Image (cartoon, grey):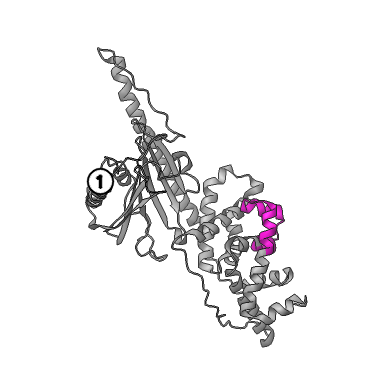
Amino acid sequence: MDEQTLRAGMRDALDDEPPLGLEPDRIADEARRAQRRRRATFGTGVATLAVLAGAATIPAVTGPHHREVIPAAPSVVTDVPTEGAVPPKLSQDELDQRRRMLENHAAKAVRRVAPKLDDVSLEHSGLIGIGAPRPRMPRKLNMSVGFTDSTGPTAVSVEVGTAGTFDKAPSESCDDTLTCEVVNRPDRSVLVRDAVLVGPRSAVTESVSHYRTDGTVVRVTAFTYDPATPSADEVRENPALSEEQLTGLATDPKFTLGK
Amino acid sequence: MFARDQAAALRRSAYLLCGDWHLAEDLVQNTFTKLYRAWKRVDDTTKEAYARKALMRAWLDERRRPWRRVENRSGVIPDSGSTGSDPEVAGQRARTRNLVAHALTEVPPRQRAVLVLRYWEDLPIAEVAAALRCSEGTVKSQSSRGLQSLREAIARYDPDLVGVDAEGTA
C-alpha cells in the first residue's frame, strides 16, 4: 500500500460519517462543574490550614505562659514526607493477622463514613509483595468493598501500602489528572485528592491518597461506574462516595500494615 | 466556538484512530474537557496543535484502560450498502473503505497515531513528533513500521489489493 492509497482509503473510511452527537456547550458545562468542585475542595483545605495555624498561634500570643509556637505548614509540599521510612518487619503470622484485621475493618470503615449504604461487604482482597522476599519487604493490601446506594451497585477500592510500595511522590501524583490538589497536614502527612478520566462516557475515578510519616500510603478510590462489571452505558454523574468520605477512609489510622 | 469549529475534524481523526464513531466522540469530549482546563494557558496560535496533542493522549490513554472497548478483530469485513450510481464502483469503494478502516484497527496504537497524523492530517514530521512527545527519528521509524503493519493487515483480508499496490498501480 502506498501513501496515496492510504490517504484515499482514509477518506473513503469516513464516507459513512454519522451526524455529530457532541454538544460542545454541555462539555464546557461539565468541565466548569469539575473545576468548581476542585476549587471548592481546595478552599476548604486552605481554610482548615488557616484555622489550625490560628489555633497554634493564639495561645502563644494570649496565653499566660510561654508556649512553643507550632508553625503553620506550607500549603503545598513537593517532598515525600516519608523519605527514609522503611517497611515494617513482619513475620508471616503477623502479616496474616494484620491482613485479617484489615479485611474485617474495611467494610466497617465504609459503613462508618457512609451509614446509608446497603449491602456493604468486602468483595475481594489481595496482598502483594514487591521485590525479593525479605524481612522488611514492601507490601500492599488491595481491598475492594462493594455496596449499593440509590443509584445501584458499585464499590470503593482501598489500598494500604507500606513504605516502598507507591512509586510516586505526592508532587508527581497530579500528572494526567482531571483535577488534583496536594494538601499537607499539621502532622506532616500529605493528602492528595485527584480525579482521573477513565475513558468511555466520561467515566471518572476519584481518589484520596494519604502519605503518612511512617511510610504508609493509603489510597482510597471511588468510581462513577461499578468496577466489578464496568459498562460504558451505566455511568453515574458522581462517584458514590464524596471527597470527605474518601478522606475519612484514607486517614483512618487503623488502615496500616505496621504494628 | 473553537469546540464547535473543530469537533467534526477531531472526531474524524479520532475515528481513524479507534474505528468506532461512539468512542471517537468520547475521545473528542475528553479532549475538549482537557482543553477547557488549559484554555488560559494555551496560546491562540497553538490551540489546534494542543487539541491534537490532547486527542492523541486521550487515545493512547484509552488503549491502556483495563476495560477499554474491545475492537472488532473477527477478520470479517461487514457488508456495506452502496451509495454511488455505478453499483460496481460503489461496491469497490465500500469494500476499500471497510478494508482500510478494519486494517487500521490492527496496526499498533502508536504506529496508527503516526499514520493518522502524517497521512490524514498531513502534518510535517516535526509536528507529529511534538504531538506524540517523541523524536523525529521515532516518527519516521513508526511511520515505516505502521505502513508495513497496514500492508500485512490488508493482505490478510485481501491479498490481491496488496499485490496490485506493490506494483504501484492502485
Residue shown at 50% from the left, 46% from the top: A175
Looking at the image, which is closer to me, B18 or B11?
A: B18
Residue A50 in view: yes
A124 to B106, vertically: above or below: above
Residue shown at 64% from the left, 63% from the top: B116
Horizontal placement of A172 versus A257: left or right? right
Q: Quadrant of the C terminus of chain A?
A: top left
Asked if the magenta segment contains residue B104, the reply would be no
Question: What's the magenta bit mostly, secondary-structure-wise?
Answer: helix
A147 to B74, vertically: above or below: above
Residue type at tag 1: Glu
* Picture quadrant of residue A135: top left
Q: Residues within 10 Å of mark 1 (few under 14, many from 20)?
A: some
Residue B76 horizontal/vertical position (percent): 55, 80
Magenta span = B115-144
Looking at the image, which is closer to me, A73 or B8?
A: A73
Q: Quadrant of the N terminus of chain A?
A: bottom right
Residue A22 in view: no
* Picture quadrant of residue B150: bottom right
Label 1: which secondary element = helix
B159 to A7, vertically: above or below: below
Residue A246 horizontal/vertical position (percent): 32, 46
Looking at the image, which is closer to me, B88 or A9?
A: A9
Residue A9 horizontal/vertical position (percent): 67, 73
Residue A40 horizontal/vertical position (percent): 39, 41
Question: Which chain is disc 1 placed on?
Answer: A
Residue shown at 46% from the left, 62% from the top: A200
Asked if the magenta segment contains residue B138, the reply would be yes
Question: What residue is shown with label 1?
Answer: A94
Q: How many marks?
A: 1
Residue shown at 38% from the left, 26% from the top: A72
